Image (cartoon, rainbow, N blue to C red):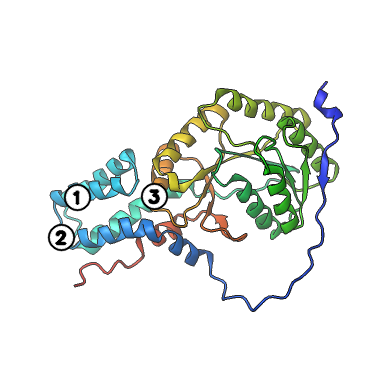
Amino acid sequence: MFDFLKKRPKISQPTAIEPVSAPDPAPKLSFVTKLKLGLAKSRNKLGLGLKALFQKKIDQSLLLELEELLLTADIGIQTTEFLLKELAQKLERKQFADGHALYAALRELLIRVLKPCEIPLVVTAEKPFVILMIGVNGSGKTTSIGKMARYYQEQDLRVLLAAGDTFRAAAVEQLQVWGERNQVTVIAQDTGADSASVLFDALTAAIARKFDILIADTAGRLHTQSTLMDELKKIKRVMAKCLPQAPQEILLVLDASIGQNALVQARQFHQAIGVTGLVLTKFDGSAKGGMLFAIAHELKLPIRFIGVGEGIDDLRPFNSEEFVAALLETDPSLGSA
């Protein structure tokens, strides 16, 4: 029925890694601390701007200045209009005694925008649970797979990886490195092989060997490449032939550093393939952390994970209150000299 089933996949088994002596590591930072460090540039753009702005007289002219600040922080036109409308109504009702009150109101509104998207990815009882990873080249897709493998291993779940990116040079090898690092089996074929073939073989293996989770890599593609988008649809059909409910999750990986372009990618991938969740990467060092609000406000897709560094533990489930606190700081010291 499927010609590609005649090919035998390469199964990369985890190998033992010999321990090496190393100096005592530096104290490990919490994920919240890493998030604050990662959002430093975005916070300097937005948080410090708000601090200066909210020391001024609270009136309509201040809202105009706030509009410009929110837009330059990549929060987006629709989200900015929503925030200003809500704040203007509170201003008319004289709910702001000073800058602290206005700051608190804005903080709560930002959390309200993100809160509906704070939906952790729950692995269902149906096994294997198949996660299909998609996105453009350079978004951090393969790296996120390695980090997710570690995250689920920490929950005592058996993870299998599938090297479905058979187009990019060294993509298979990169995933195999992550597999060895995590002591996780990787199903792969040679570069240039049919991606659907690889993922079918991996899913067959996951079923036969009773793995809890299969995380499948795919080739990076632009949302404008209709042929490659059709390939994703083919992958979905082929996997469903093997397991009707697969894939249970389609995660779109977005690079936070590209700002509003990430919203364009999310919108068009969702229209083409039906995205069930988002992974936001590369917040560390980005000055465009505000883009998350635009994506959440318009698309309302679940934000499953965010990444703030290169470490294997630097990808964690999204928490809206932690994100807003890291972006604005909980105490902006408004009114100080």
Kind of element beneath mark 2 = loop
Residue 14 x/y as whole percent: 80, 55
Q: Is residue 207 above or below residue 37?
A: above
| Quarter of image, res 156 | bottom right
Q: Residue at x 70, y 26 (%)?
A: 237
Foreground residue among 330 and 224 = 224
SS label for mark 1: helix
Q: Type of residue at label 1? A: Glu
Q: Is residue 212 above or below residue 6?
A: below
Question: Where residue 329 appears, x then y in whole percent?
Answer: 36, 64
Closest to the observer, 67 or 5: 5
Label drawn at residue 288:
3
Q: Residue 56 has which mark?
A: 2
The residue lying at 15 percent from left, 60 percent from top is: 56
Callout count: 3
In the image, farthest residue toward the front = 169
Query: 32 above or below 85?
Result: below
Front residue of this view, candidates 20 and 40: 20
Q: Disc 1 or 3, which lies upstream in sequence?
A: 1
Determine which residue is flagged by label 1: 65
